[in-house]
Image: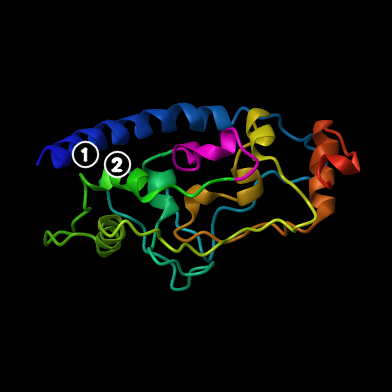
């Protein structure tokens, strides 16, 4: 009984912290240096079309746009909607993928991170039935089992991308990963083996293009 009470209290605090952090980080992520307007470098891809969900007029607790008939990207063991979490509720990327700020690689959030909120909310429908995807999450957590997420992006083995340096430089996650906050299901938007795209970005921003910066 005590454990449930502690987790419920913790969940409320975590949800509140995520919402507050989302406001500050969303503001901060827009402050990175922009590429000159007369260059061919495009910081962000389009934010509409097949695989995207419009967020226009959506508010917490409000109606959601209808999903496209076909979603891009691989199906996951749990239908985690980034457009709900990162879009509607403005949860910042670093709240879940916190390793990006201090590590070369980016972590997947633990089930306990997800349960910080979802021990409190089951997002029931109008009939009071709990959300089936949240039920799957709770089942993984109860069994102390890791969710077998399907990988979306993978850098070639011959190159390295230190996430912490790019985060510290103020580069928005969306620059490489696309408009995650608009995606019902995540899919890759960049060819990570395209070195020309990386070097163009470095040129625009006045960053080193020494081969050993990425290949070692």
Vertical comparison of 182 with 78: above or below: above
**Label ID, residue 54:** none
Task: Name the image quarter holding residue 78.
Answer: bottom left
From this view, report whether residue 36 is shown above or below residue 115.
above
Label pair 1/2, CB-CB below 8 angstroms: yes
Q: Which residue is mark 2?
A: 116
Q: Mark 1 or mark 2: which comes first in sequence?
A: 1
Q: Nearer the viewer, residue 142 or 60?
A: 142
Residue with the mark numbered 1: 7
Report helix, strand or loop for mark 2. Answer: helix
Residue 92 in the image: state x and y as whole percent.
46, 37
Q: Residue 129 location, x and y as percent?
A: 15, 62
Q: Residue at x 80, y 33 (%)?
A: 205
Q: Residues within 10 Å of mark 1 (few under 14, many from 20)?
A: some
| Residue at 15 percent of width and 42 percent of height | 4
Residues in magenta, as a range: 92-105
Numbered circles on residues, count: 2
Q: Is residue 27 above or below residue 117?
A: above
Q: Alpha-carbon neighbours of circle 2 within 10 Å: few (<14), some, or many (≥20)?
A: some
> Foreground residue, 97 or 125?
97
Question: Considering the numbered disc 1 on the image, is that residue within a helix, a strand or a loop?
Answer: helix
């Amino acid at each position: 009984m005590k454990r449930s009470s502690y987790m419920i209290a913790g969940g409320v605090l975590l949800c509140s912290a995520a919402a507050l952090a989302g406001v500050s980080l969303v503001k901060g992520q827009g402050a990175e240096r922009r590429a000159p307007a007369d260059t061919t470098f495009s910081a962000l891809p389009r934010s509409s079309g097949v695989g995207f969900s419009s967020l226009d007029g959506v508010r917490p607790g409000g109606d959601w746009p209808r999903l496209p008939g076909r979603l891009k990207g691989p199906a996951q063991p749990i239908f985690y909607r980034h457009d709900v979490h990162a879009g509607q509720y403005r949860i910042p990327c670093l709240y879940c993928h916190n390793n990006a700020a201090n590590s070369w690689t980016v972590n997947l959030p633990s089930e306990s991170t997800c349960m910080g909120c979802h021990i409190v909310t089951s997002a029931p429908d109008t009939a009071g039935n709990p959300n089936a995807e949240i039920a799957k999450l709770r089942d993984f957590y109860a069994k102390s089992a890791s969710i077998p997420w399907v990988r979306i992006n993978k850098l070639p083995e011959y190159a390295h991308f230190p996430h912490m340096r790019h985060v510290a430089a103020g580069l928005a996650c969306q620059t490489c990963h696309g408009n995650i906050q608009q995606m019902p299901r995540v899919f890759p938007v960049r060819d990570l083996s395209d070195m020309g795209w990386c070097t163009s970005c470095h040129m625009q921003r006045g960053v080193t293009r020494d081969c050993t910066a990425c290949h070692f």
